[in-house]
Image (spheres, grey):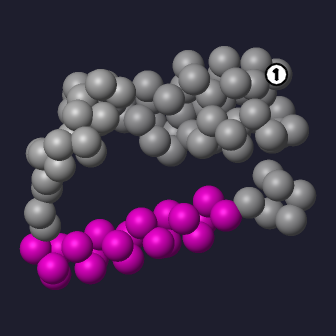
Amino acid sequence: MVQAARETNAKKVLVATETGMLHQLTKANPLTIFQPVNRAAVCKYMKMITPAKLLRSLRDMTDEVTVDDAIAARARSSVERMIAIGTPSPRGE
């Protein structure tokens, strides 16, 4: 997302993710207005993830999350639709 923010020439971008991303996006491209779709989209669990904790989890293979196959299939379908919606236009916007 930050890379896309750096590369966009758009004057305004709607952001449909956790609002904690807004500062990073604005820092990456101060000329673009990043407007949250939902200002209340705050995830306390995302705030708990730090680079050090992520590194430890990947290095030690800990904190694995397992999801039932049926739920995973539905979630995968949702993520694929979100990616399709977010695919940039030929102009990159």
In the image, taking residue 67 as reference, residue 19 lies left or right, namely right
- In the figure, residue 72 lies in which quadrant? bottom left
- In the figure, residue 43 lies in which quadrant? top left
Q: Quadrant of the N terminus?
A: top right
> Residue at position x 35%, y 27% from top?
51
In the rendered structure, which segment of residues is drawn in magenta?
68-87
Q: Can you give x and y, in whole percent of width and height, for residue 10 in the image?
A: 83, 39
11 or 62: nearer the viewer: 62
Q: Which amino acid type is marked by label 1?
A: Leu
Q: Would you name the residue on which mark 1 appears?
A: 31
> Residue at position x 14%, y 53% from top?
64
Looking at the rendered structure, the secondary structure element under dot 1 is loop
Is residue 88 placed above or below 19 in the rendered structure?
A: below
> Residue at position x 62%, y 28% from top?
25
Is residue 90 placed above or below 53 in the rendered structure?
A: below
Q: Can you give x and y, in whole percent of width and height, for residue 78 in the image?
A: 38, 70
